[in-house]
Amino acid sequence: MIVWLNGAFGAGKTTAAYELLDLLPGSTLYDPEVIGAQLRWMLPKEQLAQTADFQDLRSWRRLVVDTAAALLCEVPGPLITPLTLLRREYRDEMFGAFAARRIPVRHLLLHAEEPVLRERIDTRAAADGGATRAWALSHLRPYREALPWITAEAGTVDTTHLTPRRTAERLAEALSAGEGAVDIVQTPEPTAETVAAGILLFDDRDRVLLVDPTYKPGWEFPGGVVEKGEAPSAAGVREVFEELGLRLAGELALLVVDWEPPHPPGFGGMRLLFDGGRLTTEDAATLLLPSAELRGWRFVTEEEAAELLPPVRLERLRCALRARRAGHPLYLERGVPTGATRSGNLLR
């Protein structure tokens, strides 16, 4: 198990973590900042110059999960991880990867009021010559902005008037009460190329429906991986029912077939998008979301989708919308139409 202690700089995460070691038998301190320091030694200087925060490194986020899994082969756990995590997409990526490895996460927030945080930051700065003061203060605003999603998920311990020992005791009590358990779908990581089928659903304004997964960053189309012996269109229909509680009737029109190349650690494969038709206002009102898999849905325009979808899925959507208008499917490789369709009417 991972006990992730979140909070702003000055909330007392590290001091409480050391105290918590005494209260949780078998526990081990796991500090992912060590991984960030090692990456700074290994990565090219040119790449590091473009990265202000090691959390922005995809390699760091993957190594955090892989290293935790390796440590849990050596120690009984839990791993106590005192680290500020403010970007929800990074939470989805790492916590989703933990879930794929069947490693449960307990997410606990150590919160203190901002005047207290500033006072603690100033005290720390006086001890270290001010080396961390500007950095710590710069994170207060992102912390305020992240509080809504963190508090909606994490168990919260207010450390404003607590000693490190009392904070650790409150954390132990919260863990014993089951607080902070991360309910997230346990989607196994692929071990080879996959075929995945997505379904595009539209409203009466031709906006497309996107869903927000809890287990990976970025928004997505309803759908999922095709199971062994399953037809891709049937897989899409099944996934739409499992994800949204919506039963699709009739045949689906194929819009896009896209070959996604391997990109370590991903294996790539074939990605298909089908036209699932229009949803009435009444249909949309009946949509149900599995909380362990999806946290939200919305209809968006193509321009709005550009703010939500990762680049590869955005290009796939754009081609699918063009194919829908033209009435003919497109074949893509790496998100780019190939063959005669590249210069044909479909892209005009």
Image (cartoon, rainbow, N blue to C red):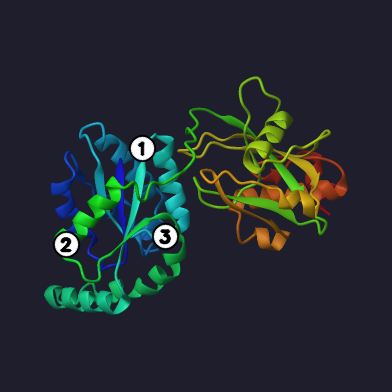
Question: Which image quarter: residue 37?
Answer: bottom left
Tag 1 residue = 103
Question: Compared with residue 85, is residue 213 higher up or lower down, i.e. above or below?
Answer: above
Question: Which image quarter: residue 164?
Answer: bottom left
**In terms of sequence position, does the residue under pointer 3 or pointer 2 come before the other?**
3
**In terms of sequence position, does the residue under pointer 1 or pointer 2 come before the other?**
1
The residue drawn where x is 52% and y is 34% is 267
With 348 as the anchor, is 268 left or right in this view?
left
Tag 2 residue = 164
With 58 as the anchor, is 128 left or right in this view?
left
Tag 3 residue = 150
Q: Secondary structure at mark 3?
A: helix
Front position among marks 1 and 2: 2
Q: Secondary structure at mark 1?
A: loop
Tell me where residue 272 appears, x and y as whole percent: 70, 37
Q: Quote the CA–CA distance across marks 1 and 3.
A: 20 Å
Which residue occupies the foreground of this view, 316 or 300? 300
